[in-house]
């Protein structure tokens, strides 16, 4: 059996090696290392794929969030609501801009923002909501957009984990994750669903004015060379990373399908294990053949018999990598703890940190590996 990895970037690379190597060599030959043709080509390709008017590439997914908030003109003291259960980047940039983070709980089944908790957290100072499409599943955007409209709030989608996922509205229309709110952001970190071979990120919007503002912010606040109208940042996607991304983008749907196939295999294998809650996709409750709202950046189980930590060790002992995303809720992190928070408001997150475990998930898992992983888990949790 091929060695099991949490993410197998090497096997994925081997399948696209020719085009990736040729593209990188082209960049090297051209010496257009920054803002070369591949950056613009990838930008155009991604705009088409996402069906969004503007993609603004930048240096990483954390910058993308910060720049989106700068572009919207959020001011110190403005409250920004986001989730307690996510990677810290989301709340980090809120803090860096001297905005006030307001953390709320998530839903136990989707791991995404709890709509009732969101409503409760809104105050006259609230200016924006940042839903995170956690583990690859789109949050309940229809409800979020409705609330945002009612209270005149911006919606910034942190789409670092769900690029390629679709959201289906009640009337049947579909839109790509990250293009539904005022602005969306993503990361091209190597292990993300569309990863480059270094750091990268992008911002998406259908708002022409906002796109113009953001294009200046990423480039030192310049709208005309050497005229700095606003305080900006330096955040660029380099040409080599853009060349890799342009080569990989045509495979993104196939990558999403491969992840869903692995998730479906896992779900079926764990269906009758009483100690396991398997992930669901919000559109049908399981992972049917047509589910496209979940692209399984992570495949995350909840272990209900208190043996999560033992399972973690047992899998490691059997050379099955696995991870706890996330072991500490943001409201308990030293950098983000605050007297404003009340433990009772985080009952779901506080439970999840003790029960979740993420299994190997990538585009190259084969059936032999999946059979071994699921048997090892099921035998241990009998
Ligand atoms: C990875 C990630 C980010 C940050 O992306 P970087 O490119 O590493 O800066 C932000 N938010 C979420 C939810 C992520 O998973």
Image: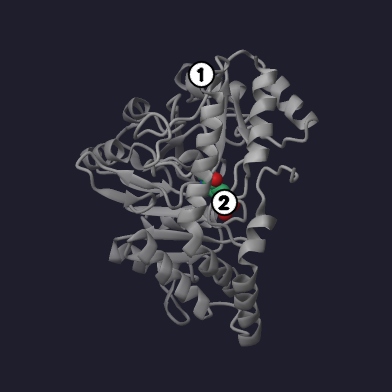
Count of all numbered marks drawn on residues in the image:
2
Q: Residue furthest right?
A: 317
Work out whether 288 lies above or below 178.
above
Q: Is residue 230 visible?
A: no
Q: CA distance from mark 2 to mark 1?
A: 31 Å
Q: Position of residue 47 (x, y in %)?
A: 38, 65
Foreground residue among 365 and 231? 365
- Name the side, left or right, on which 167 lies relative to 90: left
Whether the residue carrying mark 2 lies under 8 Å from ligand 1 is answered with: yes
* Neighbourhood count class around disc 1 (C-alpha, 10 Å): few under 14, some 14–19, many 20 upward: few
Work out whether 379 lies above or below 357.
above
Residue at position x 33%, y 45% from top?
A: 167
Residue at position x 35%, y 32% from top?
A: 284
Residue 367 image-quadrant placement:
top right
Residue at position x 46%, y 38% from top?
A: 101
Locate the N terminus by quadrant. Answer: top right
Locate the C terminus by quadrant. Answer: top right
Pair 2/1: label in front: 2
Q: Position of residue 369 (x, y in %)?
A: 67, 39
Q: Position of residue 20 (x, y in %)?
A: 61, 71
Q: Is residue 325 visible?
A: yes
* Mark number, residue 192: 2
Label 2 sits on a secondary structure element that is: loop
* Neighbourhood count class around disc 2 (C-alpha, 10 Å): few under 14, some 14–19, many 20 upward: some
Residue at position x 57%, y 41% from top?
A: 88
Looking at the image, tell me whether mark 2 or mark 1 is earlier in sequence order.
2
* Mark number, residue 343: 1
- Name the side, left or right, on which 195 lies relative to 122: right
């Amino acid at each position: 059996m091929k060695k099991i990895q949490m993410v197998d970037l090497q096997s994925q690379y081997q399948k696209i090696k020719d085009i990736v190597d040729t593209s990188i060599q082209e960049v090297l030959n051209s010496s257009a290392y920054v803002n070369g043709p591949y950056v613009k080509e990838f930008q155009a390709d991604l705009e088409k794929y996402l069906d969004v008017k503007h993609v603004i590439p930048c240096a990483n997914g954390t910058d993308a969030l910060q720049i989106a908030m700068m572009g919207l003109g959020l001011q110190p003291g403005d409250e920004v609501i986001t989730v307690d259960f996510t990677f810290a980047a989301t709340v980090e940039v809120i803090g860096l801009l001297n905005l006030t983070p307001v953390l709320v709980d998530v839903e136990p089944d989707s791991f995404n923002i709890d709509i009732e908790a969101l409503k409760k957290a809104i105050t006259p100072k609230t200016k924006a909501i940042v839903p995170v499409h956690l583990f690859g599943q789109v949050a309940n955007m229809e409800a979020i957009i409705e609330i945002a409209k009612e209270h005149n709030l911006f919606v910034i989608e942190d789409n670092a984990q769900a690029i390629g996922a679709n959201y289906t509205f009640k009337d049947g229309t579909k839109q790509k994750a990250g293009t539904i709110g005022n602005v969306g952001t993503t990361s091209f970190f190597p292990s993300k669903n569309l990863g480059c071979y270094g750091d990268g990120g992008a911002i998406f919007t259908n708002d022409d004015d906002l796109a113009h503002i953001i294009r200046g912010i990423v480039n030192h606040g310049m709208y005309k060379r050497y005229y700095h109208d606003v305080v900006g940042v330096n955040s660029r996607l380099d040409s080599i990373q853009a060349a890799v991304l342009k080569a990989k983008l045509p495979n993104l749907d196939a990558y999403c399908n491969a992840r869903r196939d692995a998730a479906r295999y896992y779900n079926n294998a764990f269906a009758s294990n009483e100690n396991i809650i398997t992930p669901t996709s919000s559109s049908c409750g399981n992972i049917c053949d047509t589910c496209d709202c979940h692209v399984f950046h992570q495949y995350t189980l909840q272990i209900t018999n208190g043996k999560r930590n033992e399972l973690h060790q047992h899998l490691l002992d059997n050379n099955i990598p696995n991870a706890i995303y996330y072991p500490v809720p943001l409201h308990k992190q030293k950098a983000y703890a605050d007297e404003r928070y009340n433990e009772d408001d985080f009952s779901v997150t506080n439970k999840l940190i003790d029960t979740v475990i993420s299994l190997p998930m990538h585009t190259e898992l084969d059936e032999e590996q999946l059979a071994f992983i699921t048997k090892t888990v099921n035998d241990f949790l009998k």
